[in-house]
Amino acid sequence: MARMMAAKLFGAKDTRVVEVERPEPGPGQILVAVKAVAICPSDLRLWEDGHAGGTYPDHPFTQGHEFSGVVAELGEGVKGPAPGTPVAVTPLWACGECDLCREGLSNICRRIVFPSFPQTDGAMQEYMVVPAWSVEPLPENVNLVHGALLEPLQAAYHGVSLAPSIDPEKAIAIVGAGIIGLSVLQIVRALGAKNVYVADPLEHNRAIAEAMGATATAPFATDFLATLTDLAHQPRIVFECSGHPKALGQAMELCRPFGLVVIIGVPHPDVIEFDTRPPRRKELHFVFSRRYRRETLRQTIELLARGGVDLESYPVQTFSLAQAAEAMAAADAKPAGILRVVVVMD
Ligand SMILES: [Zn+2]
Ligand SMILES: [Zn+2]
């Protein structure tokens, strides 16, 4: 049996690189040589606590769901992409058969498997077996390191798809300019939005948003209320991308009456409080966005290939697989000006 190296979580804040058996692709599967794994805030929550929402991994566990790689081997019956092709992989393995999948709602599949959440191993290992349908060739304008960022781009894309069509003349606001908020900004700009307000307390995140074409930026969503000269220009769609416990309330205050708040950020902590008066008095709509669907990877790749969305301008800090423990600690420390810490395989 061939062997490979994998970064395993043995317990809270205890990541170790160990040798394990290399998996082999079965029928309908592809073996991917993993090349880059970005560390997501949700990975950090599991790393910090040793469990995800009360679910404990029952074995030393491989983290990472934002990743790219190169096709290493095709399982029986799989026609492509050819070995050697750089690919992105969607980590949302929906069953394709339940009532929700049959309605096209694969993001909320009843039997979903999401690698890197207990109990399915994630990507921080040299090789990974994935369903053939979950793989798409990377477009030429995306390198393997930034290819890992197609996962958060998909989350942003799905959130935008939950809003009615983007009217270029109507204002939009984004709360939180991390990788999801900035990706929402790039996507709505690519769809023609001219007036996009972006709130983030961190100056370096606001600077990236401005470089990507934000109309105005401010530390907090409610700051824009003071600068709006005409309330008719209040944003009709507000994307909450931060997960900060105060952000949802602020997003609702900023939103125009009868507008829509799309919640993409995962609230942390899970239970948050907000003033019900603004959404009630303004008859606001809100929708929670859950990950992305089976087709979202292909759609985001088409968007990238057309241009208008640029992943390579996102600042990342890279570590090797041997440095996986350092990479987790570095990501947890939230280095200034870095949007993602990425583990890169040689
Ligand atoms: Zn993620
Ligand atoms: Zn399903």
Image (cartoon, rainbow, N blue to C red):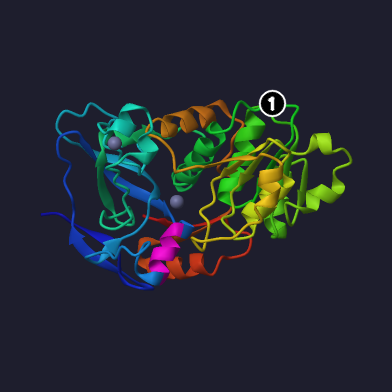
Residue lying at 89% horizontally and 41% vertically, measured from the top left: 229
State the image coordinates of residue 212 (x, y, percent, origin top left): 69, 41
User: Which residue is nearer to you in this view: 328 or 278?
Assistant: 278
From what the image shows, is residue 126 above or below residue 25? below
Question: Vertically, is 237 above or below 191?
Answer: below
Residue 215 x/y as whole percent: 77, 40
Q: Is residue 142 visible?
A: no
Quarter of the image for residue 247 reads bottom right
Classified by dominant secondary structure, the portion drawn in magenta counts as helix
Q: Is residue 46 magenta?
A: yes
Query: Residue 6 location in percent, x, y?
Result: 28, 61
Q: Is residue 313 magenta?
A: no
**Residue at figure coordinates x 44%, y 58% from the top left:** 42
Residue beneath the point at 18% across and 53% down: 22
Residue 123 location (% of width, % of height): 33, 53
Q: Residues within 10 Å of mark 1 (few under 14, many from 20)?
A: some
Residue that badge 1 annotates: 167
Magenta part of the chain: 42-48
Q: Is residue 224 left or right of residue 35?
A: right
Of 9 and 201, the residue lying toward us: 201
Residue type of the residue flagged with mark 1: Asp
Q: In the rendered image, is residue 246 in sight?
A: yes
* Quarter of the rendered image showing ligand 2: top left
Rendered-image quadrant of the N terminus: bottom left
Q: State the residue lying farthest toward the right.
A: 229
- Mark 1 beta carbon near ligand 1 (under 8 Å): no
